[in-house]
Structure formats: C-alpha cells, structure tokens
Image: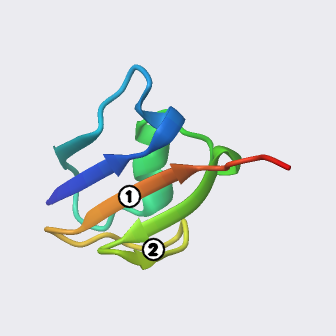
Amino acid sequence: MRITVRLFLSFRAGRFHTKTMEYPAGMTVAAVAGDLALLDDEIGLVLVNDRQAEFEHRLADGDTLALFPVVGGG
C-alpha cells in the first residue's frame, strides 16, 4: 500500500518533508514511525488524513500520515 508521510519541525532534519512510501497492508502508525527511527515519546501529534489518530491506528492504502514532534516551551 502507498502512504504519504509528512514530517514536521525537527523531524524533517536529515529526513524529508513529504514522501510517498510503500508499506505492507495493515501497517500501524507506530510501525511507520519505527521505520523512520522516531520514538513514540518523541511524537506529540499524529494525524491520519487530517484527523487525530493513535499509534495503534492501522493505515490504509492512500492514507496521509502526518507526524509532529513534542513541542516544549514555557
């Protein structure tokens, strides 16, 4: 299946902004993040097709996955 992955802020460093990638059917958000060497505790927001999703969400062909890092401040 083809998934469009969009990375934001610090996740783009040394990676990419937007990329269409091939994955086996049934991949989860967590599995894709792991493939990109992103740790669950580094991820602050997950969107699938512009809707908030959990790490266990199973992706479908044609989905767009957006990953945002935890943002600190104060």
Secondary element at image label 2: loop
Q: Which residue is drawn at 41% across and 39% down?
A: 35
Left/right placement of residue 67 relative to residue 72 reads left
Left/right placement of residue 62 relative to residue 57 reads left
Give the labeled residue for mark 2: 57
26, 54: nearer the viewer: 54
Q: Residue at x 41, y 32 (%)?
A: 12
Residue 3 placed where, x, y %?
20, 57
The three-letter amino acid code for the residue at tag 2 is His
State the residue lying farthest toward the right: 74
Q: Answer above or below: position of 5 versus 45.
A: above
Left/right placement of residue 70 relative to residue 55 reads right
34, 46: nearer the viewer: 46
| Residue 48, picture quadrant | bottom left
Q: Answer above or below: position of 52 versus 23.
A: below
Residue 72 placed where, x, y %?
76, 47
Number of numbered callouts drawn: 2
| Residue 16, picture quadrant | top left
Q: Which residue is drawn at 45% across and 74% down?
A: 57
State the residue lying farthest toward the top: 14
**Disc 1 versus disc 2: nearer the observer:** 1
Residue 60 placed where, x, y %?
23, 72
Residue 50 placed where, x, y %?
34, 75
Name the quadrant of the N terminus: bottom left
Counting residues from the start of the chain, the first of labels 1 and 2 encountered is 2
Task: Give the CA distance from mark 1 to mark 2.
Answer: 13 Å
Please give the label number shown on residue 34: none
Q: Residue at x 49, y 40 (%)?
A: 9
The three-letter amino acid code for the residue at tag 1 is Ala
Please give the label number shown on residue 66: 1
Label 1 environment density (alpha carbons within 10 Å; few <14, some 14–19, many ≥20): many
